[in-house]
Image: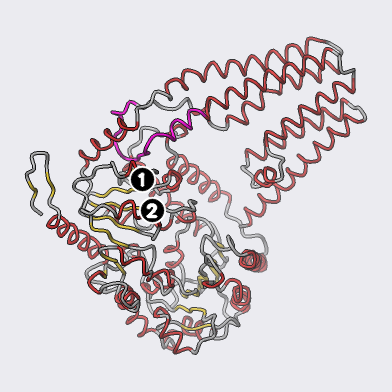
Amino acid sequence: MNKQKSQALLGFLITAVLVLSFFGMMIAVVLPSLTVFAASAAASYLADLLLHSARSTALDRLRDSRFGLTIRFIIRQFLLLGLCGAMGNIDSFVVQMTAVGLLMLFALQLVYGALLKHVRKKRQELPYTTRGLDMEGLGIRRMPHPFLMDKYVRKTLHLDVPLFAGALGTMATDNWRYVTYGGILSVSVAYLAVLVLLPGVRNALILPSADEAVDELNEELARYRPQVALYFTFAAVSRDFMYQVNMWLESLESLDLRPVIVLRERATLRYLDATPVPVVCVPKAEYLARVEMPELRVTLYPGNAGKNVHMLQRHDVKHVFIGHGDSDKAASSNRVSKVFDEIWVAGRAGRDRYERIKHAVRPDQIVEVGRPQLMSLHRWTGRPAQRIPTVVYAPTWEGWTDDACYTSVIPAGEKLVERLLAHESRLRVIYKPHPLTGTRSAAAAAAHRRIIALLQEDNVRRLGRQMTDSKAAARKLERIDRRIADLSERGVRSPFPDLGEAERTDRIRRNRDQAGELYWSAVPDEAHHVVLDRIPALNDCFNHSDLLIGDMSSVVSDFVATRKPYAIFNLEGLPDQQFRDEQRTAYASYLLDPECNGLDEALDATLNPERDGMAPHREQLKEYLLGPDHPPSVVRFNDAANDLYARGLRDFPIEHPDHAQVDA
């Protein structure tokens, strides 16, 4: 976070220089002063370059303020014309050459951008996008070279530099050659760029028809013969929501059945984690209906969404709701789930939640499969495992409406962190909020920022300095991040366009494991952590903790697998027993109210295990929430898929072209 704070400060300073440079050019036009204008223009170009090189968030704020990249270049060019007129007159040679050069350059930039946008639009008209399937038979040629496409707006806009410098040179020396040659150079390079782009554009536009594309996809799927699908759709597509499907990837890969992933929004494909499982993204329902998977008999749904109906209409497939976390929230027992053939839950608690919905879900629809994602968690040893006792504070977010606001961040987050920092025992805090925290509620966002500030300030007091990674570790992490980014990139920008998905996935996961190890070794043991990125993962934070403090969410249910002490906020002020009865995950928890009463008891149980009265209850709750340890949840998940697939084959035997049936 200190690194992010430093980057934000640097971005602010560069932005200030950028804005002041434009004021400097305006003043130079009024004076007029060639020296001031040249210095200000150079500063503006340099500041722009630094902002983009650092990928500063200030760029977004500038764009939102109607001062985006293109507008900045246009303003700078108009100011140049203004200076030309102020230094000479409106009919002077330098004004005419500069104006003609800028107009020709603008026209060529427009043509260049229009060509690329047309290519991308035509590509979007293809009925689907795939990953991990061999679609070479379609004959789709690659997009133009990455250099011609990547950041092309910045590159083409900067072609005005020779003309800009030439105009200033002519005004300084009264020599017509500078503006003439500068203009010729700018326009010639732009024209050459368009010529170089044209062959790639022509190749990229040689596309099959929709019917040809669907037929080829069906042929490839017929070769692969998928048996189980993971289907995901979400209207508000962003990386923050993709955890709902990403959490199931390794479980899907471990199945005996041949899996396929079916997505509906193209953006989800961009945020989908690396996986060797073939992926098909079909945005339009009319094309999804034409995708043939004759051996498909099981479809898994991580979320309830309107477009699920486009897959649910397949009558020869068994449809299963697997969700994206088991918790006591209302969303974890939605009445809509009755449309599925089965609902897979972790343990008996999930079954009970659905059975409490009268006349909604039949008992035979519920199948307990455990939580395969939790296999990597370390079990409680009966004493703090960390050298500095560590508390993970992992609150949920504020939810879609205030009526279902389960987060403790707003009413209690600051008080909790202050109490932890002031505790007589030296504690370490890992703050791992829900990725959507503060996205809907300004109050939650403000409280979130204050919590981060408290932890940063305490790190300074503890360490006598800002907590920063060691330079060697930081450099290694940056290299790993770049490597993961390069491996994750596909298509025209990929440095590894021919790398198979299985090998790509293996490399990405090995790099993430290495990054996780470096993360914990790069800072002192007593330093607090604010975890907002994907590394380290939540399970890794659990393994480095001794106590969890959270809200009513699936995070708590997952943590119960460790058998470590945990505490939950009772924000509604219900009597303890009533709260435990209504929220099954609270059965073995220490309870906190909005004033953090109950915290001392939870900490005492963690630091002095002999006084941990909830330990036996956690053992009972673990089996109730997540099922037994044996057989492992990975095995139960696989067995449930195999069993349902066999029943699907009995109900709908596979028919080959000769109409011979395949036995289950």
Residue 90 in picture, x, y percent from top left: 87, 18
Along the line of sight, the residue nearer the viewer: 321 or 41:
321
Residue at 41% x, 27% y is 142
Of label 2 and label 1, which has the lower sequence position?
1
Label 2 sits on a secondary structure element that is helix
Label 1 sits on a secondary structure element that is helix
Q: How is the image coloured?
A: secondary structure
Q: Disc 1 designates what residue?
A: 285
Q: Disc 2 designates what residue?
A: 307
Residue 477 in picture, x, y percent from top left: 51, 49
Q: Is residue 98 left or right of residue 346?
A: right
Q: Amino acid at mark 1?
A: Ala
Specify the segment rendered in magenta. 118-139
Give above or below for 159 relative to 622: above
Query: Could you tell me which quadrant the N terminus lies in?
Result: bottom right
Along the line of sight, the residue nearer the viewer: 520 or 39:
39
Label 1 crowd bin: few (<14), some (14–19), many (20+), radius 10 Å = some
